[in-house]
Image: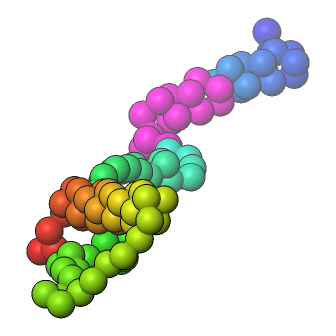
């Protein structure tokens, strides 16, 4: 009994499918797709350092002293003003020197 053409095609297709599957299963590994490179590692470092303004590098200097022959005359109100301005200057110099002492020493 001869095979019908449709049956022959079915047998051939089955045989061809089996060979193809066997070839795919035993062939070399498929190349992996090349994608974008992974994200780079970013390292963040925080550094704290004290920085002082350039004005603090200056020296206040010595407190002025009156000459031996100096004569200061004033009334009570003028004396109060002179006392206040001297106290103010001493306080400003003290604040300046304290701030300067907090600055780091240059290396």
| Residue 16 against residue 61 in the figure, above or below | above
> Is 82 situated left or right of 66 in this image?
right
Q: Position of residue 87 (x, y in %)?
A: 33, 58
Magenta part, dominant SS: helix
Q: Position of residue 75 (x, y in %)?
A: 44, 65
Please identify the quadrant where the N terminus is shown.
top right
Residue 87 belongs to the span the image colors magenta:
no
Q: Residue at x 59, y 33 (%)?
A: 20
Q: Quadrant of residue 105?
A: bottom left
Rendering colour mode: rainbow
Q: Residue at x 26, y 59 (%)?
A: 94
Q: Residue at x 23, y 63 (%)?
A: 97
Q: Quadrant of residue 59?
A: bottom left
Q: Position of residue 67 (x, y in %)?
A: 18, 88
Q: Quadrant of residue 68?
A: bottom left
Question: From which residue to which does the magenta span run?
Answer: 16-30
Q: Residue at x 42, y 34 (%)?
A: 26
Residue 29 belongs to the span the image colors magenta:
yes
| Residue 44 against residue 15 in the figure, above or below | below
Question: 23 or 9: nearer the eye?
Answer: 23
Q: Is residue 13 visible?
A: yes
> Is 3 situated left or right of 93 in this image?
right
The residue sitting at the top extreme is 1
């Amino acid at each position: 009994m001869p095979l019908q053409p449709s049956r022959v095609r079915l047998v051939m297709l089955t045989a061809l499918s089996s060979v193809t599957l066997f070839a795919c299963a035993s062939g070399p590994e498929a190349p992996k797709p090349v994608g974008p490179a992974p994200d780079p590692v970013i390292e963040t470092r925080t550094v704290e350092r004290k920085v002082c303004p350039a004005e603090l590098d200056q020296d206040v200097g010595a407190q002025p002293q009156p000459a031996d022959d100096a004569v200061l005359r004033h009334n009570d109100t003028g004396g109060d003003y002179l006392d206040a301005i001297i106290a103010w200057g001493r306080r400003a110099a003290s604040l300046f020197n304290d701030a300067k002492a907090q600055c780091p020493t240059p290396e």
